[in-house]
Amino acid sequence: MSGHVLTIDWNQALTEMGAGVFQKGHFVLSSRGHCREYGNFVVPVNINHRLFELICVGLIDLLNMEIFTINRTAVLLGIGTGAFYAHQMSLKLNRSLSRDKSKRMECSFAFAVRRPDGTLTLPYDQSSLINDQAVIFVDDVFATGKTYFEVGNLIQNAGGTPMQAVFILNRALPAIDQVARQSNFISQPKCLLHKFLEIWASREACFLCKQGMPFSTEFGKGPEEFHLHGQPPWPKE
Ligand SMILES: [Zn+2]
């Protein structure tokens, strides 16, 4: 799998294959920034969906495989939607790494969740999985880098080394480079698709709030879910 270069037009592939990639509405990101286009990479109901497989292979192709040859083992860590991708990638990587028995390289999987107060945590005592390990972070969207930054700290606090991060979509050019310089990750983050989508830093700065446009409820099941997804409290009527 390493050294194999996928020459896919991801913008075209994700749009044509019905990923619902650029959902229109009025959204609030975990950074509290507001936006009207959201990169939606929710895993299709059928986990063997061609698009899901394609994205997993594409993300694996972005990995620096030296992480495995140097460390022998590594952990793929995902959050939310990213956890589905990280898990599938770890299965695929283990199948390809195990072909060369002499090297005994291995890839394991871990996931973090966002608490209702918005902070990140590793449930089920997964710190022991990450301790002393090289960790690769997998996520669907890079927006402002808030999660990327938090995950770097989370991995270090659990005794791991944040090696690299891969994203399906970077929606915040060129902020990814600025955030990467300040983060704990050793390698530069990589993304399948770079597409600038506007973000307003606050409710006060938001063009849609000024127009009185209501928030989209497509995040889960409405007000309660909205908050669980790291969103600020549901706006009062
Ligand atoms: Zn707004």
Image (cartoon, rainbow, N blue to C red):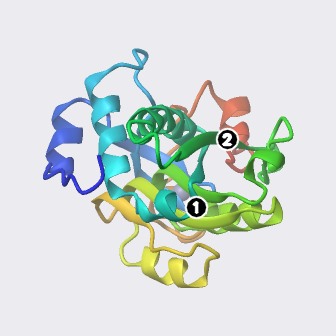
In space, the residues marked 2 and 1 are separated at their CA atoms by 20 Å
Mark 1 is surrounded, within 10 Å at the Cα level, by few (under 14), some (14 to 19) or many (20 or more) other residues, namely few
Circles 2 and 1: CB atoms closer than 8 Å: no
At 81% from the left and 59% from the top, the residue drawn is 158
Which residue is located at x 38 percent, y 36 percent?
99
Task: Give the secondary structure at mark 1.
Answer: helix
What is the three-letter code of the residue carrying label 2? Phe
Q: Which residue is mark 1?
A: 71
Say which quadrant the C terminus sits in. Answer: top right
Q: Residue at x 59, y 52 (%)?
A: 74
Q: Is residue 220 visible?
A: yes
Q: Which mark is residue 119?
A: none
Above or below, 71 relative to 14: below
Looking at the rendered structure, the kind of residue marked 1 is Asn
Residue 37's spot in the image, x, y percent?
38, 50
Q: Classify the position of ligand 1 by quadrant: top left, top right, bottom left or bottom right.
A: bottom right
Single out the residue that lies furthest toward the right: 125
234 up-or-down from 35: above or below? above
Residue 9 vs 204, above or below: the answer is above
Find out if the beta carbon at label 2 lies less than 8 Å from the nearest ligand 1 atom: no
Instruction: Left or right? Give the position of 158 relative to 91.
Output: right
Q: Nearer the viewer, mark 2 or mark 1?
A: 1
Quarter location, residue 162: bottom right
Q: Tell me if residue 210 can be seen.
A: no
Label 2 neighbour load within 10 Å: few <14, some 14-19, many 20+: many
Q: Position of residue 220 (x, y in %)?
A: 59, 28
Quarter of the rendering containing residue 137: bottom right
How many labels sit on residues?
Answer: 2
| Residue placed under numbered mark 2 in the picture | 111
Q: Position of residue 201 (x, y in %)?
A: 56, 70
In the orientation shown, which residue stands out farthest toward the top?
Answer: 46
Tell me which label, 2 or 1, sits earlier in the chain. 1
